[in-house]
Amino acid sequence: MRSTSTFSILFWIYSSRSKNNQAPLYVRITVNGKILNISLKRKADIHLWNADRQRATGTSAFSRELNHYLNQAQSKLFLCYQEIQGENKPITVTAIKSRYLGTHKTHYTVKDIIEYHNSIAFDILRGNTPNLYLTSQKYIFLFLKKEFQKTDMDLSELDYSFILRFESFLRKLKPKHYQKQIGNNAVMKHIQRLRKMVTLAYHLEWLDRDPFSKFRQKLTKTNREFLTAKELQAVEDLELANSRLSTIRDLFLFSSYTGFSYCDLALLKKKHVKMGLDGNLWIITERQKNGNSVKMPLLPKPLALIRKYDNHQDIFSENGLFPVISNQKTNSYLKEIATFAGITKNLTFHMARHTFATTVTLTNGMPIETISKLLGHSKLSTTQIYAKVIEEKVSGDMQLLKERLG
């Protein structure tokens, strides 16, 4: 924060909005080059206004009363500036305006908007999203502590520079659980969550301006990893003596042949398995993430897995389909399974969803529109990220084209 600041006051009339020679009167305050206009709720005769003196000319009662009012406004604004300076608070145009208008008594902070956001949003956020917000919020407070030596900050202090510094802080950060720097897209996700909370504050009129108005996200395209048919078969063929590893492998396979995410699979119950119009068993449920309907016809392999775990002793959820443990522990077990199967990829549970979108469906000729429906996506463009066309599919399509052209 600056120890000194430049401050100026300018009175002006909005002559282009004059009516019957009467124009709205404004005062412009400037602090360190940043400008903010305040309506004085008064009008001045454009023929009597002296722009150089910033006062009305003449000795009429109207001119004298208006000039007296402007002198008082100028004194009050300068007093507001001195009070903020004396209190050793950030001197900004917003702070001076708030004090001048008498609204400065309510100071909203970063902690205020985070607590308010969590109180209204956590009941409607789906899946793991609340935990992701908590992680982003943890990084925000860590940033305040390391960069500003503060545990909180007035929202009025947030500006474009703050966002750039937060971005730089995140790019250098090495979380203990991650052991390496956060990737670009993860950085953008954390900033996106901050942006949503700051935008909420702006809509609540806790902020006079949006500090994100000039900020642009810089996402990089990523290739979603999936298992090839050979790798998927290697996982299926594993003989695992450890019952817990065997269960995790079965859950991964079920997701690979249905596309269910971990959080959706964990919530599956017997009531979700229903007879479809075609006389076969389907899973009919909703995605926890977005509430979209999912109607999944069951292939023989996932159907066999459901029957395998019917009334299994480790199913603690009432009428649940499968025994489940935490996602974190599941991914830890998958690393062991990958080693046993000779897979060098970073095997995670979500890779099963990618595998369903590519190896199981797209490669076997299923239209991407159908895949999108099965995955419960709201937009086809989301599915196109998952369903990457693999070389085997390209080769097969080209062979068909050769035959048709032949």
Image (tube, grey):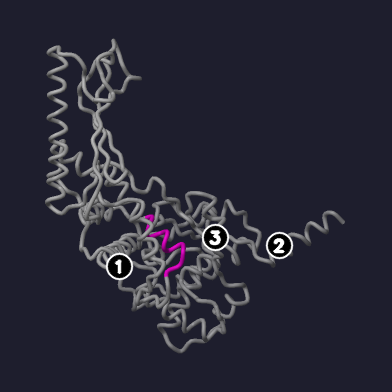
Residue stretch in magenta: 182-192
Q: Is residue 92 above or below residue 21?
A: below
Magenta span: predominant SS is: helix
Marks 1, 2: nearer the viewer: 2
Can you identify the residue that label 2 sits on?
394
Local SS, label 1: loop
Q: Residues within 10 Å of mark 3 (few under 14, many from 20)?
A: few
Residue 120 versus residue 197: which sits nearer the camera? 197
Q: Quadrant of residue 151?
A: bottom left
Can you identify the residue that label 1 sits on?
318
Marks 3, 2: nearer the viewer: 3
Q: Residues within 10 Å of mark 2 (few under 14, many from 20)?
A: few
- Residue at the far bottom in the pictured view: 241
Could you tell which of marks 3 and 1 lies nearer the N-terminus?
Answer: 3
Q: Quadrant of residue 210?
A: top left
Residue 346 versus residue 246: which sits nearer the camera? 346
Examine the structure image and report whether residue 187 is included in the region drawn in magenta. yes
* Mark identifier at residue 221: 3
Q: Is residue 56 above or below residue 186?
A: above
Local SS, label 2: helix
Cα distance between the residues tagged 1 and 2: 45 Å
Cα distance between the residues tagged 3 and 1: 41 Å
Q: Quadrant of the C terminus?
A: bottom right
Local SS, label 3: loop
Residue under the image location 44 percent in, 64 percent down: 261
